[in-house]
Amino acid sequence: MQLGRWFLVLILTFSVAWTAPLEKVRLQLQWKHQFEFAGFYAAKEQGYYQEAGFDVEFVEYNPSIDVIESVLDGTNTFGTTYSSLIAAYLQGKEVRFIANFFKHSPLAIATQPHIRLPSDLFGKRIEGIESELQSATILMMLRRFAMGLKDIEIVTPTFNIADFAAKKVDAMVVFVTNETYMLDKAEVPYHLIKPSNYGAEFYDVNLFCSKTYAVQSPERVRAFRDASIRGWEYALSHIDESVSLIERLYNSQSKSGEALRYEANQIKNIMLPTVYPIGSIDPRRVRMIAEEFEELGIVGAQEMNLEHFIFEDAKPQVALTQEEEAYIAQKGRVKLCVDPSWMPFEAIVEGKHIGIAADFFGLLSQKSKLAFELYPTTSWQESLDAAKNRACDLFSLASPTQERETYMRFTTDYVDLPIVLATDIYKPYTEDFGSLRGVKIGVVRGYAMAEILKKEHKGLSIVEVDNIMQALEMVQKGELYGYVDNLMVIAHTIQKEFTGVLKISSRLPHEIKLGVGVRNDDAILFSIMQKLVESVTEAQIQEIYNHWVTVQESVAADYTRMYQIFGVLGVLLLLFMLHYIQLRVYTRKLRTISRTDLLTQLVNRMGLDEKLNYFEGMATRYGTPTAVMIVDIDHFKQVNDTHGHAVGDRVLVEFATILRKTLRATDTVGRWGGEEFMVLCPNTSLSQAIVIAQNLREAIASHYFLGVGSLTASFGVAILDGATSIDDVTRHADDALYSAKAQGRNCVMSHT
């Protein structure tokens, strides 16, 4: 028995000896210890930091510390701070934004009861630390009343409510998550001024590090972020345990368990973990906050470059759910099938995927940390067969057909170009492709275009080929009248291989829209890919196009005159193609304008109808639910009658801004008509939709509309699924809205 004990001690000794040493890091907190940082405490207590290789020391805030500078000078490794982090970056501070935990700032000002408006703070004594009062949340509110910090007297805080209760100060900066509890408990009368009521909506508890540390140790940054997120997940699901931990180890403010539990529940409402993935950063929201800083004059327009601000591995630029992130973490990589010969869109060259689609998927990988592994094939048909047999999970570029939908689902398209006919240079240009009869037209075997031609142009003889090169060689030899394919692909291949031999002789009355094909037995992967595709901007796609649509070969000056002519023809063909792309860009801009409400800059009724049709298709094909909300501003007619239509229009713009800022990046909000708005939330259940609607309702009710004051809104919620038509779901949402108004307004009702 004694020998066994010594053997165990020996094993443990060697185990400890061979364990890699933990990296000692310091996390500088933006305030005193409280539930505001419970997730970080839990990450340490549960061993998540230790598993990630860290020995973490928490550094409590004191007024002599500049949180951002303490991280930049190396005193601390990580820090948490307010949205002022964004301004600091734009002003040249070399910081990296790792994760965001509070989706709305809990910062507010508690005032003596007679002080009701921000304008009443002029010349008053306000207790608070300078960094809080200099936060964009406070500054933006003061600015709306033509005030600044010079118009108030800042009093050093005592970190308790004693001076406020004794009326030694006129106001104090508070967190609504905890200090209001202390005031209520002590029965101290006060009035609460919330910056969010005056249009100041900012992130809070933002985790960051220095650029130097992020560049030198990106894997350490990622590990610390992931461990912190795990800690927050644990803390929010084990509130009583987390409260006990704070009481035992981190209770420098001597808070009661009741006070900490109150704070915990308030924080849960601010983090909204069922709506937003914990720790997620929405780049669109970051840019909106940056624009607020520009409006404040804190940063200039020329400084608005946020490209490297968000830690690359930490993005997500896409708001993935915990389930989706776990899927990526577990799976790591997915198999990708491509067209091996379809430049400039894609090809397989020396075992590598190249072209527009390859760059597009490289961008998706950066956004999600999901790796795409090429599944090599030698033809399009072989790629299709691989997808049918589940040898690959994704298709880089594909359009839906009845046959393909038996084994694939399709995301929103990201390629949309016309179909043209290539012939030899002696064939006449044909305005009406449908007038061609009895000629042989080539198309690559398995292309969706083959199905369209066979169905709609029965007078043609369709010949299926293996790839574009085979087809164009057959056209050159006279074995085919022509070959049908995408404009860009044909133009690229003619310019490179068949200059002066082949030409474009007709444009077909068809366009092929291509998205990502996803195996239809993996719903989580489809949801991830849909979000990724939707996250790519027009500018990013155009940048990728510009990289590939260029003249790849120059024409030597001393060649024969005929070769020079053919070279010129090739350049003209390229110019035609570039001109077409430019026209497409302008067309898309015009399309955007025609689908945008001029007053609110939201999607208009036409744009909403298109989105509804798209989501109806998703619901019918794949059973993916979309929540549909109709939102109506309560008593809006009184606003117009009392204040005039100019003020009414301003209210509509402010209202639209609240909706846009509060919703997720994947949601759509548009103006349905008059004072009614519609919100579409894809992949959202009824219970989730009600949470989102309540969050919107509270954001509206707490907002101060300039010149009007407080307003409320009523919500009707319904679900668009495979069994419900668009007409039915809009009627259901409208009925629910009517019920909300009948209940007294300012509430959410749903159709069940």
Image: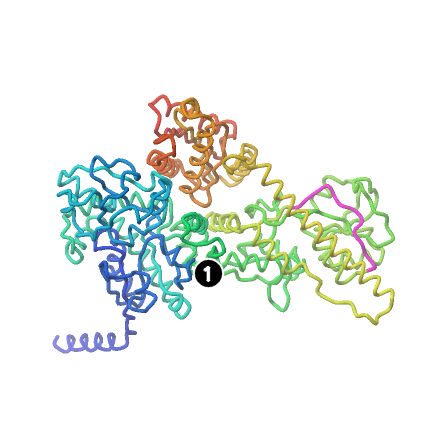
Task: Please tell me which residue is depicted at 59% across the width and 39% down the height of the picture.
Answer: 593
User: How many numbered marks have been drawn onto this rendered protein structure?
Assistant: 1
The segment highlighted magenta reads 500-512
| Residue 320 visible, this angle | no
Residue 434 seen in the current view: yes
Find disc 1 in the rendering and name its residue. 308
Q: Name the dominant secondary structure of the magenta segment.
A: strand
Scheme by which the image is coloured: rainbow
> Which x, y percent locates residue 429?
83, 47
Residue 310 pos. (x, y %): 42, 58
The residue lying toward the viewer, choosing from 401 and 515, is 515
* Image spot of residue 493 (x, y percent): 73, 59
Q: Is residue 582 magenta?
A: no
Q: Is 733 in front, or is 450?
A: 733
Amino acid type of disc 1? His
Above or below 391: residue 649? above
Q: Position of residue 52 (x, y in %)?
A: 32, 65
Of the pair 169 and 526, the residue shown nearer to us: 169
In the picture, which quadrant includes the C terminus? top left
Q: Is residue 748 left or right of residue 250?
A: right
Mark 1 is surrounded, within 10 Å at the Cα level, by few (under 14), some (14 to 19) or many (20 or more) other residues, namely few
**SS at mark 1 in the image:** loop
Which quadrant is home to the N terminus?
A: bottom left
Instruction: Give the quarter of the image for residue 343.
Output: bottom right
At horizontal 35% and vertical 36% (from top left) the residue drawn is 703
| 506 magenta-colored | yes
